[in-house]
Amino acid sequence: MTAFAPKQILCALDLGPASRLVLGWGGLFAQAFGARVDVLHADWIEPPRYFTPAQFQAIAEEGERRKAKLVEELDEMAREVVGAGVKLEASVIEGHPVTVLRDQILARRPDLVVLGSHGRSGVSRLMMGSVAENVVRESPCPALVARGGASAPQAVRRILCPVNFTETGRRCLETSAALAVAFGASLDVLHAAEEPGVPPGELHDRLCQWVAGARQQECKVTEIVRHGNAAEQIILHARQNPVDLIVLAAEHRPLLELTTFGTTTERVMRHSPAPVLVLPRRVPQP
């Protein structure tokens, strides 16, 4: 597997409280990996159908003026938060956030997408949560979701990597180790044992052996075994320890089930106190 080393980062902003947090994380990754940052805002206005052609025209003209002003504001905010030395560009595109982000990810092919989990308030707050989940679910590249209520990141000192002894877990471990090296962070490798009857000591020895065989990057690693539901144990560990980032590798279920919630990835995204980096499902090569 190619080591995770993003060179193009797409930060999606909704202009709400999470915007500076998103830029902060984009800046941290850009500084660590020498990447450029593209800042994107989806400007979505849906006028009432009863508007006259003249009213639609007035809205369109006002939209162009607003778009130019938004680009200036985004550029100013990004340069303030991301800091000097990072190449960045801001853009505003009209359309629904999910559609705009999906199209732009496919067109630009970034190595990493960063977005917030909450919008401004009320309906927009719920919409942004839906935007984040839909984008992460469909994104072909890694996506980092930062909670709107969190403080701006200063550094990444501790990374949590849940694993399950599978090829997906190995991919998650390799990426987490590469991040730990880049940020100079320690790495907690956690296995949540949901099956009863396995002696804790035996399971911990198995985890240590598995980590030793799978990890390709050298960093400080602590192997941890917890018993119980995987999502609950991941969230509990993150709440009980000063974890700065959680790395998960997504496993997509059949299409019918994608409309429901309750998977480990979705539950952790919704309730984790720390930002979550979701690695996309690996698509088998033909």
Image (spheres, grey):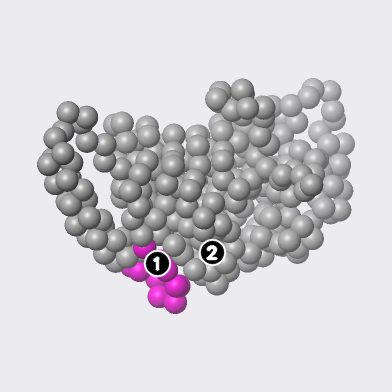
Q: From the image, tell me which residue sits under label 1.
A: 89
Q: Is residue 49 left or right of residue 88?
A: left
Q: Residue at x 49, y 63 (%)?
A: 28
Whether residue 106 can be seen here? yes
**As rendered, which of 124 and 24 lies closer to the eye?**
124
**As rendered, which of 93 and 85 lies closer to the eye?**
93
- Amino acid residing under circle 1: Glu
Quick check: 246 above or below 39?
Answer: above
The segment highlighted magenta reads 79-90
Q: Quadrant of residue 229?
A: top right
Find out whether residue 117 is within the magenta segment: no
x and y percentages locating residue 190 in the rendered image: 70, 42
- Amino acid residing under circle 2: Gln
Q: From the image, tell me which residue sits under label 2.
A: 8
x and y percentages locating residue 140 in the rendered image: 61, 48
Q: Quadrant of residue 109?
A: bottom right
Quick check: 73 above or below 278?
Answer: below
Quick check: 29 above or below 282?
Answer: below
Q: Residue at x 63, y 27 (%)?
A: 255
